[in-house]
Amino acid sequence: MRISPAALVLLLTGLAACGGEVTNTAIAPAPAEIPVAQLPKVDQAKILDHIKALSSDDMEGRAPGTPGEEKAVAYIEGQFKQIGLQPGNPDGTYIQKVPLVGITGAQAKPLTFAKGSRTLQLKWKDEVVAWSKHVAPEASIAASEVIFAGYGVDAPEYQWNDFKNTDVKGKTIVVLVNDPQVPDPAKPSALDPTLFNGKAMTYYGRWTYKFEEGARKGAAAVLIVHDTGTAGYGFNVVQGNLGEKFDLVAPDKNMSKASIEGWITTDAAKKLFALGGQDFEALKKQALSRDFAPVALGVKASMALTNTLRTIDSRNVVAKLEGGDPVLKNEYVVYSAHWDHLGIGDPVNGDKIYNGALDNASGVGTVLEIARALKQTQPQAKRSFLFLMVTAEEKGLLGSEYYSVNPLYPLAKTAANINIDEVNPWGRTRDVSVVGLGASELDDYLRAAAQEQGRTLTPDAEPEKGFYYRSDHFNFAKQGVPALDPQIGDTAVDKPGNWMKTKKAEFEERDYHAPSDQMKPDWDLSGAVEDAQLFVAVGYRVANTTALPKWSAGNEFKAKRDAMLAK
């Protein structure tokens, strides 16, 4: 059986720690550790009180730019003050303003490919879904040269560059979804574990990366070829992007992004490549090699969109607990959770308020009680703590993205991010699931603390879906800050077999992003509290260690961190 990338990292680090014997002992224990059991206790009743308050109908689903935001922000700020935390913004407030723009696009001129006298026009929604992030009334491309750029990846750590020396400025690039699925030379039925984490998705496989990299290369348009098998979802999910899209308002009004971003179906791609005299399947196969070079299709693309715009002034809420060391207090451990949810929407069984109790009133309540516990911990930590409740996670991780590019404190001085998004309401577990297990030394801190509770760490069961890139911690990782994404464990302490996995699946099917995501009478937060005690220990120990936590060798964010710390 092929060893997963996460397991391989654990194996190698264990061998290094014990001279060849595989071990589950943490390799980087922090100094001045207080046993988990001796840390101040996280209060289960208080977490429930927070969830009840934040998910009440009075909060109206906590959508950004609504009265629900006003109430949620006021509640969180009030709790920060009650705990005795300092304002997190250096301007003396608990608020970081986050300017958002809502963009609703419509097709003005269809996406048309032309080669000589022959043309191919794609059907809106059925064959192409496209939009523009430009904060402008319209966006277009006209007779833009079309280039197939493989997977659209430029990954120095894998010696992989799909662009080679091809200039794509002002051109339309067509790219494939996901990472290159390169077969293992020793076992062709498996994926090469040395490239792009094998089966586990890296950020290079995320569709958001494709658009970002295309913009960095100066492309006028970026079109991703959809494939259900490798994307993990059908084209109907892509079609859901045709409504209002939110983004941050950059100083350049987002004009540095590609004019048009979008998806086309595989069948549409085959017709496009045939128009250019190329075989789609043959070029797709060529793209699985490091030697692949972009292919000009000899086709020109044209399209125009109109945008309806609205702006929202939203807010992150942030508090600080200052460290005790005169030097290290200028470095930070950041705990984060998103306060927003979906607001008021289409009624389901007569209920139109999307309360967001588990997602993510539970995370906010837990971070508040982690903050209370750390405020009581003695001796005082050397580094400072930042408690960051972000907006617009449900709109595309926008509040955390805004902080990551407009940090209140330097990211080079940010030791770690611990993000809490949905906690365990179904009782104690024997394990803690970690999305991206093996990514950084933060896992070692968590493993050591978990062992004190007699528990283990388990990896994400579906690494190919790229969950590590789909919550707020990712924006810290993207900027180089080691980030931890703990999730609900898989094995219940006092329930049979797959009971916990079944409960999680039931939530995803029945309650996720539905009005029924409300507090349930059978909720048992004993497991959530046990997890929270681990997160207190991890943050406290990172705040006291001499060396900053590091990314694992080969991680896609390591180079960013190394460059940041080298300045």
Image (tube, helix red, strand yellow):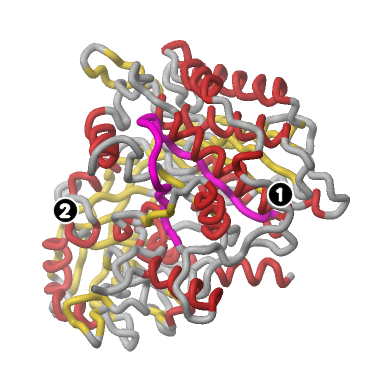
* Quarter-of-image position of residue 503: top left
Look at discs 1 and 2 and give the one toward the viewer.
Answer: 1
Residue 350 in sight from this viewpoint: yes
Image quarter in which the C terminus is found = bottom right
Does 70 sit above or below residue 207? above
- Front-lying residue, 444 or 39: 39
Region of the chain picked out in magenta, as a range: 414-437
Mark drawn on residue 332: 1
Q: Amino acid at mark 2?
A: Glu
Front residue of 563/247: it is 563
Q: Residue at the location (42% across, 47% down)?
A: 432
Whether residue 470 sits left or right of residue 80 in the image: it is left
Give x and y (percent) for residue 293: 33, 84
Q: Is residue 260 visible?
A: no
State the SS at label 2.
loop
Q: Do the residues bearing badges 1 and 2 touch, measured as CB atoms within 8 Å?
A: no
Residue 487: x and y, percent? 42, 45
Q: Is residue 210 left or right of residue 514?
A: right
Q: Is residue 424 magenta?
A: yes
Q: CA distance from mark 1 to mark 2?
A: 47 Å
Q: Secondary structure at mark 1?
A: strand
Q: Locate the N terminus and report the quarter of the image it occupies.
A: bottom left
Name the residue type under label 1: Tyr
If you read the primary sequence from the N terminus, does the residue marked by circle 1 or circle 2 appear first?
A: 2
Q: Which residue is mark 2?
A: 127
Packing grade of label 2 (10 A; few <14, some 14-19, many >=20) is some
Q: Which residue is found at the position 19% from the left and 73% from the top?
A: 115
Q: Residues within 10 Å of mark 1 (few under 14, many from 20)?
A: many
Residue at image location 35% in from the left, 56% down from the top: 466
